[in-house]
Amino acid sequence: MSDKIDEIIKNHLNVQRDSLLPLLQEIQNELGYLSEESINRIGLSLGLPTSKIYGVATFYDQFRFEPKGRYHIQICHGTACHIEKSSRLIQEAERLLKIKQGQTTRDGMFSLEVVNCMGACSLSPVMAVNEKYFHGIEARNLKEIIENCKVKQV
Ligand code: FES
């Protein structure tokens, strides 16, 4: 995997701190997250302190620093979903899974991501588990969805 990271970095060798985004996005697309190793490799290759790279990456919600869980839960917090109280869904997911958004459960089963719009605003609030969409759900429905993941593929 480190060969792949090096290959991606090689294609971005002239990037500066303020144009790191495409590089970070490409690495995340490849790995599913930004590993410590990938951040270190970027720093070494581009001569940038890792603190600067983390500074850029943590500014954007899109970047993850832990691998995704077997079940990756996305909850939309775009305007339409926010109006339909998606904040409650996010809070309930964090409570049930005992993680915060951007994190993965210790057993690697679940990860939680809050996204801006999932393109189904008229069906808000919207969430997805491994890209299977659920719409019009309430916080009380989350427990059942999570339990179903534990016993069978959703
Ligand atoms: S705002 Fe949630 S799907 Fe568009």
Image (spheres, rainbow, N blue to C red):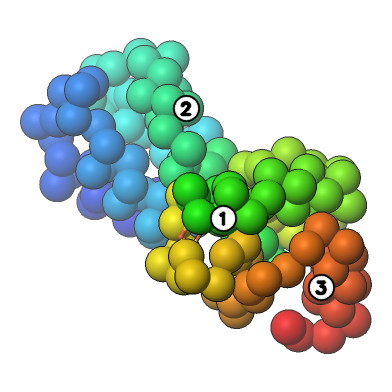
Q: Residue at x 42, y 26 (%)?
A: 59
Image quarter for residue 53?
top left
Above or below 120: residue 40: above
**Residue 148 locus on image (x, y percent):** 86, 79
Q: Secondary structure at mark 3?
A: helix
Name the N-terminal-most of marks 1 and 2: 2
Q: Which residue is mark 3?
A: 145
**Residue 153 locus on image (x, y percent):** 76, 85
Q: Which residue is mark 1?
A: 81
Above or below 40: residue 130: below
Q: Residues within 10 Å of mark 3 (few under 14, many from 20)?
A: few
Q: Residue at x 36, y 33 (%)?
A: 41
Q: Residue at x 49, y 70 (%)?
A: 122
Question: Which mark is in front, 1 or 2?
Answer: 1
Q: Amino acid at mark 2?
A: Thr
Is there a contact, CB below 8 Å, between mark 2 and mark 3?
no
**Residue 28 locus on image (x, y percent):** 41, 50
Q: Which residue is mark 2?
A: 58
Q: Secondary structure at mark 2?
A: helix
Q: Does residue 42 appear in this view?
A: yes
Q: Is residue 22 left or right of residue 109?
A: left
